[in-house]
Amino acid sequence: MLILVTGGTGYIGSHTCVELLNSKHDVIIVDNLVNSKAETVDRIEAITGKRPLFYQADAADDNVMDLIFATHKPDGVIHFAGLKAVGESVEAPLAYYRNNLLSTIVLIDNCIRHGVRHFVFSSSATVYGDNQVPFLETMELRPRTNPYGETKAMCERILTDVARVNPGLSVTLLRYFNPVGAHESGLIGEAPQGIPNNLMPYITQVAKGILKELRIFGDDYPTPDGTGVRDYIHVVDLAEGHVAALEKAVPGVHIYNLGTGRGTSVLELVRAFEEANGLKIPCRIAERRPGDIAECYADVTKAREELGWEAKRGVFEMCRDAWRFEQSYEAGE
Ligand code: NAD
Ligand code: UD1
């Protein structure tokens, strides 16, 4: 299939392009580079031996997207493009609603106009809010505490409504848990701008000496060791999940959790990182971060049974590959 990948030079998008190309699909990337670099296209080519087509363009620009759809006639779209910083979304809600909603509306509209039958959307476990773990696809969604999370829930709703009146269309909503790690080549990975908000990139920057110590946000949660529990998933497993979802897509709306089904606490992840890489991470216990929940992990039965997909890589590989990328990133940029 020929797949149009928006946000394809970003963290998850770039790994998915690699897996698509490795699975003999062709790829066109559309990315406006607000949070990534064009060199990623060279790196995807270096890993796979195949060069995806690349357009530096805004996925919310209807005229440009119409031209790209008309020129290439893709078989499917994977829509990663979006803004994703929770704190920033509270400060600049309109930028988040405009970018994340408009790009989704423009893309699904183009799919319908140009007869594209497969649409895969990057959603997030954040839509579950503080439900009872493990999170199941059938659970009623809880209100989010920030505009970023709202955009994910709203896009899910828009796409569901559109699919209802377009019976030939397949819409797959993938709810990611906590993607971490990097491709084992060390050529692509997560390179956040500024001080990272998320745990793994914070740990790798402490390991590298860019940041002094890790602040552990709360050790009094009702979890086994008191620190927050999350379902970390290796980004290459996540990328493989997209290929499985696309290849199994049938008309209708299909929702899948992409996680490992296992919870890991902050302290457990720090210890795993230290063991995997032979390093010490200075830590101190700090206040809880506002908006955080105690536990978040997936029920992954549906993805396993319907897509034949499950995560294969463990916390050791996640920590090893995240650190390898952090080191090569220093050398390469
Ligand atoms: P990322 O920032 O690395 O990648 C997103 C890419 O989209 C970037 O390359 C950026 O330049 C591009 N982009 C943004 N707006 C655009 C627009 N209007 N037009 C074209 N390109 C645009 O983020 P990521 O971690 O790879 O996340 C990909 C998707 O997955 C996002 O939608 C994100 O919300 C979702 N998601 C991410 C996580 C996570 O923890 N990383 C978790 C759940 C869901
Ligand atoms: C964050 C986002 C969430 C998004 C998810 C995607 C917030 C409030 N939530 O959630 O919307 O869907 O990423 O990956 O930003 N931690 C520390 N010290 C740190 C950083 C994190 O102790 O410096 C802890 C957190 O309290 C949490 C765990 O590490 O218990 C994971 O944090 P993080 O990587 O930010 O992910 P989420 O909290 O799941």
Image (cartoon, rainbow, N blue to C red):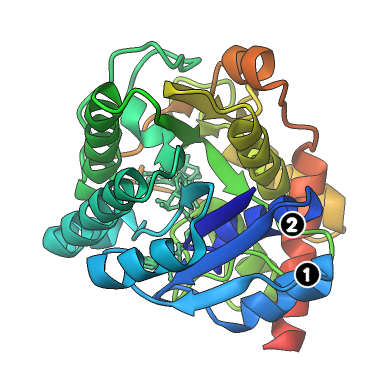
Q: Nearer the viewer, residue 232 or 247?
A: 247
Image region (quadrant) for ligand 1:
bottom left
Q: Quadrant of the C terminus?
A: bottom right
Q: Looking at the image, tell me whether mark 1 or mark 2 is earlier in sequence order.
A: 2
Q: Quadrant of residue 254?
A: top left
| Residue at left offset 41%, top offset 39% | 123
Q: Is residue 149 left or right of residue 138?
A: left
| Residue at left offset 72%, top offset 21% | 308
| Residue at left offset 75%, top offset 63% | 323
The percent position of residue 109, horizontal first and vertical second, equals 26, 48
Of the residues shown, which amino acid type is indicated by label 2?
Leu
Tag 1 secondary structure: loop
- Check the image and report above or below for 320 versus 210: above
| Residue at left offset 31%, top offset 43% | 112
Of the residues shown, which amino acid type is indicated by label 1?
Lys
Q: Nearer the viewer, residue 246 or 284?
A: 246
- Check the image and report above or below for 148 versus 131: below
* Residue under label 2: 21
Tag 2 secondary structure: helix
* Residue under label 1: 50
Q: Is residue 277 left or right of residue 290?
A: right
